[in-house]
Amino acid sequence: MVISHILTWALLAAEICLAFPVAYLCILSCSALISARKRASEVAHYASNQEPAQTRFAILIPAHNEEMILGILLKSLSQLDYPQNLYTVYVIADNCTDTTAQLAGQFDGVQVYERFDEVKRGKGYALNWIWQQLENHPQDAYIILDADSVVVPTFLRSMDRELARGAKALQACNTVLNVTESPGTALRWVALTLMNHVRPLGRNGIGGSSTLTGNGMCLSRDILARYPWQAFGIAEDYQYYLTLVQHSERVRYVPEAIVRSQMPTTFAQMRTQDVRWEAAEPQQSQWHTALQLLRTGLSTKSFVLIDAMLELLTPPLSFMVASCLLAFVASLLLRSPLEIIFSNIILAGLAYYIATALYLLQAPRAVYKALLHAPGFILWKLWVYFVLSRSRKHNHEWVRTARTPS
């Protein structure tokens, strides 16, 4: 009897710990639904009263051995609905041993910069290098795109509109190109929609800051002058995002500026990408960073910092789903009515959060079919977290994910 009481209280404590991040995600989901409706009317207004383009953009594409897929992105950029004299495409052929540079040079309006450095390797170093090369060029803002992407024709117009409204750092809607190619790509679409659309759209609504996801970032010349790029780790985008929010700067999410990326389809490709995506910065403690954000946020009364702390401490979705299901099963075994009700409420909150993504972007039928593979996908993600917790060798160097164009 005593053991049963101890287990019941321990389960209740675990469910309360799970309830906090789930409640936070539900708040973001509600805010995202409200913000989506509001933005729809705003976009319709801007479409009927379109202002002349103002911003001079430099589109930066770091590319390491991307001869197979780079042409698809460059072709989509040639179809942008934006004055050609107001943007230039720069391809940084970074430590390439293939024909990436020659391929990029065949496209009109594309300038190619080749960089070779066997010590300072990776996207962060390539971006820092190209900004030094372009220091005297007359750009107002910089767009960073991954080589395996395509953009919608109105991409730059959407960014220009937000910059004209006073934003200094922007993040595009970073989603999946080959959604229906496999159950894995469909489930990645769900995961990225939640992380890269529902959550930042919700933060727009509550006054928080979007994260930077690496692909589809837009940084004004002014913001880079104030906070020079010093992010060189595997998660260089998140590292720079933390730099901005620690100075109470907001990254504004622009859902109409859509960039779609090629997702891996084979197990080997998925493994390389997932390990890189989930790897934390080895020199940083997540809890230490969260405590720092909380302290600074409370002292400066900055909601941006408080929200960034909540985002940082929100566990991965796979972990939360697995934990909530285990809590539900444990409550049934203990035959505790309170814990059963509590676990059902938490599961309902997670279901609402996931359903928000399916509703907002009108998921194709293949995504619903792919949900049958979700248990295997969750187990795979949990294995990735276990591997990363046991080893630091994946946290030091960026490893390119091999891809094949759809």
Image (cartoon, helix red, strand yellow):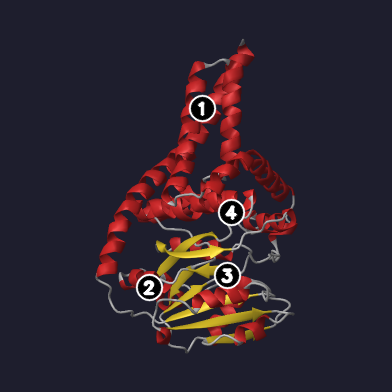
- Mark 2 highlights which residue? 157
Q: Earlier in the sequence, mark 2 or mark 3?
A: 3
> Considering only vertical position in the picture, is 78 above or below 330?
below
- Mark 4 highlights which residue? 180
Q: Nearer the viewer, mark 4 or mark 2?
A: 4
Q: Residues within 10 Å of mark 1 (few under 14, many from 20)?
A: many
Seen in the image, is 6 located left or right of residue 346?
Answer: right
Residue projecting furthest to the bottom: 136
Q: Is any atom of residue 297 visible in this view?
A: no
Q: Earlier in the sequence, mark 1 or mark 4?
A: 4
- Mark 1 highlights which residue? 343
Please, what is the three-letter code of the amino acid marked with disc 1?
Ser
Q: Nearer the viewer, mark 1 or mark 2?
A: 2
Q: Nearer the viewer, mark 4 or mark 3?
A: 4
> Considering only vertical position in the picture, is 136 above or below 347?
below
In the image, what residue occupies the spot 51% across and 74% down?
A: 76
Seen from the viewer's position, the closer of residues 18 and 300 is: 18
Q: Position of residue 210 (x, y in %)?
A: 44, 58
Please, what secondary structure does the residue beneath circle 1 have? helix
Q: Using the image, tell me which numbered label, if any, was put on residue 146.
A: 3
Please, what is the three-letter code of the amino acid marked with disc 3?
Asp
Seen from the viewer's position, the closer of residues 391 and 85 is: 85
Seen in the image, is 238 located left or right of residue 24?
Answer: right
Seen in the image, is 201 located left or right of residue 135?
Answer: left
In the image, what residue occupies the spot 41% across and 46% down?
A: 28
Please, what is the three-letter code of the amino acid marked with disc 2?
Arg
Q: Nearer the viewer, mark 3 or mark 1?
A: 3
Please, what secondary structure does the residue beneath circle 3 have? loop
